[in-house]
Image (cartoon, rainbow, N blue to C red):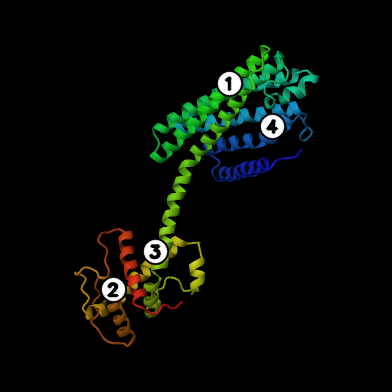
Amino acid sequence: MRYTGFDLVHGIVSFGALVWMLWLVARSPADVRRWAVAGLLAGWSIAYPFGIAASRGVEFLGVDAMNARYLQHALLLVAAYSLVCFFQFSALEPALARGRAVRDAVVLGVALVVITVANVLIPADLRVPAATVTSTPGKGPVGEASIAAFYIAANSYLLYAFAAACVWTRRYARGAEPRLRRGLRIASIGLASISLAGATFVASNISRWAGTPAPPPVVVTSVFMLLIGIVLFVVGMAYPTVKTRMAALRVWRRHRRAYRRLRPLWTVLNEQFPQDALSRVPVSRWRDALTLRSVHRRYYRRVIECRDGLVRISPYLASLGADPAEPTDPERLARQLSDALRAHAAGEAVPNQAIAIAMPTDDSLESDVDRLVELSQAVEQAGEPVRS
């Protein structure tokens, strides 16, 4: 059986997500919600290739087309049940969630029994047409009770599960923090769209059983709603994580930029006071500029080293007339710092009394770093030598 590029990408992404979730389950085996997500991903991932084989009316792994359709639907039912369990265990107390999960497991069991019996009863000459009926709107066998029972039972349970998940999502969103609440609301819209598509599928199954297949435009519209719902659900569930990662990326970029802009000040201070360096391993300037790892650690370390250096050189600045009570003028302070560093290098004696240099306007770290960056840029513009 040949696969399209989309099929391969879907397989890689879905099975990759499953492996990652199983790794998370192994780290926290007592977390029921992680088990539920693992069940959702496992059912969805494994069902996909069986669904492709069934739609094409071919065998897959020695399984004929209709049995492939049966396995696909059985796995999708388990995945839908896992989704409902995830939201139940997220929104309810554990004991109450377990009780509801048991009741929903009974409903799942009934649906699985019905599709199993119906699959066995489908006539041999109709098994391939029955398997491909979902991919051939307006065509295929009509009026066959076993085929109708198979699809009505499967789609009815999926409708029930996704509608329940939609309700639980809305309920869970009410008590969630704003970022998660927005994501859950988007996911609930997706689940509502999937539920509406499922209702249309059930109606189409009943119509086919009555002898009249649903018009192709109705089926195509239902499939479109299903796909849109899946996309919205995935986007909604990923929204909080993506927003968190984007915020973390903004902080990372700000720290990396400040780290690089502090280099002129750090260099002239480090040359005079190498004992303040928190890292004893010298790093080349190019490697330092291109390294993307440990940005936060290197950022905080550089801020501390700059502050330590200013404390050490501050007695020399005081002897040159620097006054911490005056508003900071970065250009003037940069010139004074240059003179102070030369005086320190020449071994001139000054009173050993430190003063505050380039102090922030408030107590935040960001304000402190802004003052250091202003001084660092003034040092660079003053033409202080900066060596790696």
* Badge nearest the viewer, 1 or 3: 1
Sooner in the amino-acid sequence: mark 4 or mark 3? 4
* Left or right of 117 on screen, residue 164: left
Task: Identify the residue at horizontal 44%, vertical 47% (top origin).
Answer: 244
Q: Label 1 is placed on what type of residue?
A: Thr
Q: Nearer the viewer, residue 191 or 33?
A: 191
Name the residue tied to disc 3.
258
Q: Where residue 245 sits in the image (x, y, percent)? A: 47, 49
Q: Label 3 is placed on what type of residue?
A: Ala
Residue 200, numbered label: 1
Badge 1 marks a residue whose secondary structure is helix
Mark 1, Cα crowd under 10 Å, few <14 / some 14-19 / many 20+, is many
CA distance separating discs 1 and 3: 56 Å
Name the residue tied to disc 2.
331
CA distance separating discs 1 and 4: 20 Å
* Badge nearest the viewer, 3 or 2: 2
Badge 4 marks a residue whose secondary structure is helix
Badge 2 marks a residue whose secondary structure is helix
Sooner in the amino-acid sequence: mark 4 or mark 2? 4
Residue 51, numbered label: 4
Task: Identify the residue at horizontal 73%, vertical 18% (top origin).
Answer: 141
- Give yes or no for contact between labels 2 and 1 (Cβ–Cβ under 8 Å): no
Q: Nearer the viewer, residue 242 or 330?
A: 330
- Give yes or no for contact between labels 1 and 3 (Cβ–Cβ under 8 Å): no
Return the residue found at the far left: 325
Q: Quadrant of the N terminus?
A: top right
Sooner in the amino-acid sequence: mark 3 or mark 2? 3
